[in-house]
Image (spheres, grey):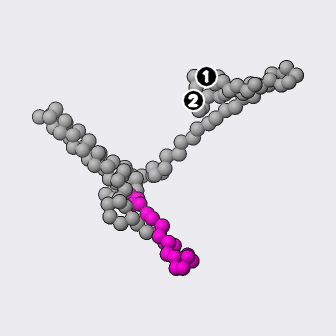
Amino acid sequence: MDLDTPAGPGGLDSPTYGVAETPAGDIIIEEHSYTRTVDILGLPVSFSLDDLTMRSALAAIFGEYTPKTQTVSTYYDGQLLDTSTEYVPGVAGMDMEWIAGVIVFTVLLYCFMKLLGGVFK
């Protein structure tokens, strides 16, 4: 009989105990612990105003714009001749999540400025 019961309120960081009973009647309790780590990527370690450009500011706020890519393979008589990675052409290749994030942030900033303008008017 093997039961895993959480010791605390629950979650990944709380320890759990495995309870097992041997054929001789002994009870074995093993403690299992799970940890969770968060690695925030894309944040600059040091920020300097000397190299501040509009491109670096956008990259710091929204991340890098990464268009979609596709792998193109060229075959001749069933033999693989060449494989290359190319950007997906047209609207299908755009990073729509990044573009939507910029648009939503722009609308939010516009509404915030209109609100402040109405308050201070």
Element under disc 2: loop
Q: Which quadrant does the N terminus fall into?
A: top right
Placement of 90 over or under 78, stated as above or below: above
Q: Position of residue 112 (x, y in %)?
A: 23, 39
Which of the 4 image quarters holds residue 93?
A: bottom left
> In the image, 93: left or right of 45?
left
According to the image, label 1 marks what residue? Answer: 8
Residue at the front extreme, as displayed: 77
Residue 115's place in the image compared with 102, above or below, is: above
> Image quadrant of residue 105?
top left
As helix, strand or loop, the secondary structure at mark 1 comes to loop
Residue that lies at the very extreme toward the top in this rendered image:
25
Does 105 sit left or right of 6 as displayed? left
**Quadrant assignment for the C terminus:** top left
Magenta span: 65-85
Does residue 3 appear left or right of residue 82 in this picture?
right
Q: Amino acid at mark 1?
A: Gly
Residue lying at 16% horizontally and 37% vertically, measured from the top left: 117
**Residue drawn at x 58%, y 26% as measured from the top left:** 10
C-alpha gap between disc 1 and disc 2: 8 Å
> Type of residue at label 2?
Gly
Residue 81 in view here: no
Tag 1 and tag 2, C-beta contact below 8 Å: yes
Closer to the camera, 70 or 119? 70
Instruction: Where is residue 26? Give x, y as percent.
Output: 84, 21
- On the question of residue 13 being in view, the answer is yes
Point out which mark residue 11 bears. 2
Task: Residue lying at the far right in this picture: please name it.
Answer: 24
